[in-house]
Image (cartoon, helix red, strand yellow):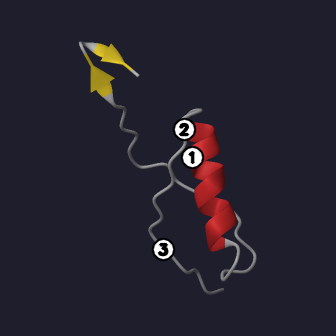
Amino acid sequence: MVVKIIELIGSSPNGWMEAAQNAVDEAAKTVRNIKSIHVKRCTAKVEKNKIV
């Protein structure tokens, strides 16, 4: 078995799941048979002490 590990960055104003899906969609253009993802880090924009 051969495993290929790549690092992706996805973003979305609608949440982490959509951001992850956007990253997978982009990767799927050149990578075949994506079987799983690992979400390493989530970040959020903060304005006036509120997550926006």
Mark 3 secondary-structure assignment: loop
Task: From the image, tell me which residue sits under label 3.
Answer: 6
Task: From the image, tell me which residue sits under label 2.
Answer: 16
Q: Which mark is residue 19?
A: 1
Image position, residue 25 (x, y; %): 69, 63
Image position, residue 51 (x, y; %): 37, 19
Does residue 18 lie above or below 4 as drawn?
above
Q: Quadrant of the C terminus?
A: top left
Nearer the N terminus, badge 1 or badge 3? 3
Amino acid type, label 1: Ala
| Residue 47 falls left or right of residue 2 | left
Crowding at mark 3 (Cα within 10 Å: few <14, some 14-19, many 20+): few
Q: Quadrant of the N terminus?
A: bottom right
| Residue 6 falls left or right of residue 22 | left
| Residues at marks 2 and 3, CA–CA distance in whole angstroms | 18 Å
* Nearer mark to the viewer, of 1 and 3: 1
Q: Nearer the viewer, residue 23 or 45?
A: 45
Q: Nearer the viewer, residue 2 or 41?
A: 41
| Residue 34 falls left or right of residue 43 | right
The residue under the point 58% across, 80% down is: 3
Q: Which residue occupies the extreme right position in the image?
A: 33
| Residues at marks 1 and 2, CA–CA distance in whole angstroms | 5 Å
The residue under the point 63% across, 55% down is: 22
Nearer the N terminus, badge 2 or badge 3? 3
Quick check: marks 2 and 3 in contact, CB under 8 Å? no
